[in-house]
Amino acid sequence: MNNMKRHFGALAAGIAAAALLAGAAFADPAIIYDLGGKFDKSFNEAGFNGATQWAKDTGGKFADLELQNDAQREQALRKFASAGNSPIVIPGFSWSTALGKVAPEFPNIHFVIIDSVVDAPNVKSILFKAEEGSYLAGVLAAKTSKTGKVGFVGGMDIPLIHAFFCGYREGFMATNSSGEVFENYTGTTPDAWNDPVGAGELAKADFDRGADIVYAAAGGSGLGVLQAAKDAGKLGIGVDSNQNGIQPGSVLTSVMKRVDVAVYNAFKDDANFKAGTEILGVKDTGVALAMDDNNKPLISDDAMKAVADATGKISDGTIQVHDFMSDNKCP
């Protein structure tokens, strides 16, 4: 009898292992957030919102995890992949190195990385034309600013965030060629995404230099910029999620990267998973400015018309916003 129990136990274990190797299609999807946490009111939270909406619409369940430090990335990926979770969605460019190592170990698990490219047969990479949404924010800022001076506070000083700045400056200068745009970054390590105090100080410095609008592309650090704008009686611009309601009346708009839609679709469409790279911009509504009752009183008809005109021209190719990532140059 004991031998029979051992036999069936081994058989069950073998079936479970085979299911994992076969891709464990029955396992829940998963999302692992980048540093800053899933309630960062920005990039991570947009991903969480997309996953939550998918669960609400389908009755499904998903697994998730918040990182505590960079060293956990490979461990977290292996944990979910070993459990058969698929797809595993990871928002954030900082995941690329870990994913490049782990994805080949689990060829039947689907991975989706947002904001970076990993070339593997079981990885889908989703990018956003952040420069296009930032261009629209620059147009709006130029039409709204009374001083002709605006600021930018980026998170980590990396090419991806420079693309936000360059698009913003390009849109601003195309609308007000005699204006000025101040450029700042919170830091050079991943801690830059979670330093609202430091980001707030940079915004205050811009306000002291005459800026009356500061755009934050800094993850959780950007909350410090919006607070500084409120304290100074100036305006901030949010990023990734709709942050207009965080400091109502002090946020001109938010440059939304529809990370929520990307996560929702990754969960929904996993049965038709296709590896490769997908790039979403203004034309695809992958990036857009947030307009709602919180910022409606701040935007003039003239400014709204200018944004609508620029949106149409970007969509039809009349305006081609420069992509900093293509050459590391900011015109």
Image (tube, rainbow, N blue to C red):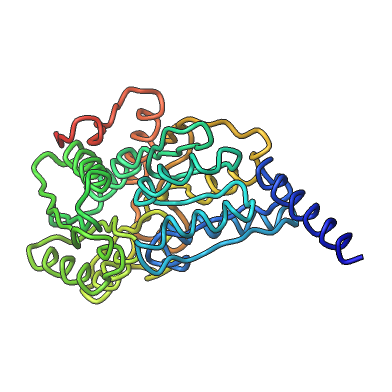
Q: Nearer the viewer, residue 105 or 110?
A: 105
Q: Where is residue 99 in the image (x, y as percent from the top left)?
A: 43, 46
Residue lying furthest right in this view? 1
Find residue 171 and report its image quarter: top left
54 is higher (above) or lower (below) than 328: below
Q: Which of 104 and 112 is in front in this view?
A: 104
Q: Nearer the viewer, residue 54 or 25?
A: 25
Residue pictured at 41% horizontal, 28% vertical: 315
Residue pictured at 48% horizontal, 30% vertical: 276
Residue lying furthest bottom in this view? 231
Q: Position of residue 26 (x, y in %)?
A: 74, 49
238 is higher (above) or lower (below) than 163: below
Task: Tell me the quarter of the image containing the C terminus.
Answer: top left
Q: In this view, does 13 lie to the left or right of 195?
A: right
Task: Tell me the quarter of the image containing the N terminus.
Answer: bottom right
State the count of labels: 0
Residue pictured at 25% horizontal, 53% vertical: 144
